[in-house]
Image (cartoon, coloured by chain):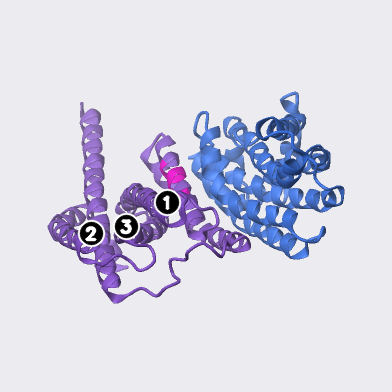
Chain colours: A blue, B purple
Amino acid sequence: MSPAPIRAAFAQAFREAWAGGAGVLLPASFFAGAAMLVPFAVGSDSDQLAAIGGGVLWVALALASLVTMERLFQADLEDGALDLWVQADVPMSAIAAAKVAAHWLVSGLPLALLSPLLGLMLQMEPDRLPPAMLAYGIGGLAFFLWGAFGAALSATVRRGGLLIALIALPFYVPTAIFGAMSLQAEVPMPLIETLFLSAATLFSMAVAPFGIAAALRLATD
Amino acid sequence: MAILSAFANPHRFMAFSNALLPWLGAGAAILITYSIWQGLYVLPPEAYQGDSARIMIVHVPAAWLSMGGYMGMAVASLVWFVWRHEIADVAAKSMAVFGAGYTAICLMTGAVWGKPTWGTWFQWDDARMVSVLVMFFIYVGYIALRAAMDTRQKAARAGAILAMVGAINVPIIKFSVDIWASLHQDASVLRLDGPAMAPEFLTPLLLGALGHTLLFAALVLVAMRAEVRLRRADALMMRRMAGA
């Protein structure tokens, strides 16, 4: 058992991120754009924005994670990479986990790194921004794992983007709840809420790769 | 395992369900009529909520079947995934539709009940309401995924994977929603489980729940029989085309 296919899937996800031209800028721009629309929709009142700003970024993060998903496995299906993964002598779930991890590093982590800037624009308190950035990073990984599960299930469906969202969104609920709780906590550095958020992400790391692997085996049949 | 294998035979399933259906239908009709008659005409107005509480005769069984339907679907999916018994997949597919239907009934009757009682159609503070709403979306995702697959075999596999992963997630989602709702629980909200339920309410409620369960089973069996016939017709068409 050699780890070569896992490394290959990881590296390939990195290359793919730039292959389309805009690369990582696309989800980041979507994230910022979705957040920017909110003050126009709910009004410019600073107190109101400060109250909802952190939650708005959670919604924007969830949507931004979904827009990157449609092509995640479809390209692998078309060029035959999936067939090679199925035949590889390493577990499919490990390859899938590597692919999603790379995808999150390229498309998900930049969103978390961008969040302090957007948080400032949405009137969040400055001392809340670093723990919020950590929370967006941890929670975003769970979003990407469940989004990838939806993407794997609908890999064979043409224009499956909306289907991915419909499948994945119920799985986003615990992360959204614990993520929002960590922003509303009394202290700026909420330990317990962050632990709950991490637990939800760890759970998704434990379950989602096996679901993704089962779905990808189905896609190759 | 012997029971599972016995039902895996479509011929035996068709004969068995044909014999069972009239009993299920009759039992459902009698029990549901009884519970609605009790709820509308016999029961006294509830002490705190007045006449609006009568809707629980439909609402509570719908809520139970919303959860029970998903559990049945997940178990059927597991059986299909492990043993590839065709009937198990037919059962999962049929239960999803009626489970989603009962979930919708639960949400709608809950809204109608909530408006005069709590003054709101939907209360985000109430963990059970939010859980049922999320459950509805899980059902809709499952049905949409099956519909999007281009072959029956793929629909069965994708549906089984989603139903099983969903079943693992449901407790986590429920737990998180419970924590979230308890954070901003409004003390003025009148709790359903505050006052203990009087036996004259409980008996028609439980019999009504049994009636709706029988109705659910009957509807699922009818849908399953239609699906089995559809697959048989498809197989016949394939054979005819292969022979021609």
Does A181 lie within the magenta span? Answer: no
Where residue B207 appears, as percent x and y from the top left, is 24, 67
For residue A151, side relative to residue B154 (left or right) = right
Across the whole image, how many numbered discs are drawn on residues? 3
Residue lying at the far right of the rendered structure: A127
Where residue B226 appears, as percent x and y from the top left, is 22, 44
Main secondary structure type of the part rendered in magenta: helix
Task: Return the residue at label 3.
Answer: B55
Mark 3 to mark 2 CA distance (whole Å) = 9 Å
* Residue type at the position of mark 3: Ile
Q: Is residue B23 above or below residue A161?
A: below
User: Can marks 3 and 2 be said to lie on one chain?
Assistant: yes
Q: Which type of secondary structure does the marked residue at label 1 adopt?
A: helix
- For the residue pair B183 and B70, the one nearer the viewer reads as B183
Q: Quadrant of residue A105?
A: top right
Find residue B115 and name its label. Answer: 1
Task: Return the residue at label 2.
Answer: B40
Q: Is residue A79 visible?
A: yes
Q: Residue at x 42, y 51 (%)?
A: B115
Where residue B178 appears, as percent x and y from the top left, is 56, 63
In the rendered image, which quarter contains the N terminus of chain A? bottom right
Q: Which type of secondary structure does the marked residue at label 3 adopt?
A: helix
- For the residue pair B120 and A176, the one nearer the viewer reads as B120
Residue lying at the far top of the rendered structure: A21
Mark 2 to mark 1 CA distance (whole Å) = 19 Å
Mark 1 to mark 3 CA distance (whole Å) = 12 Å
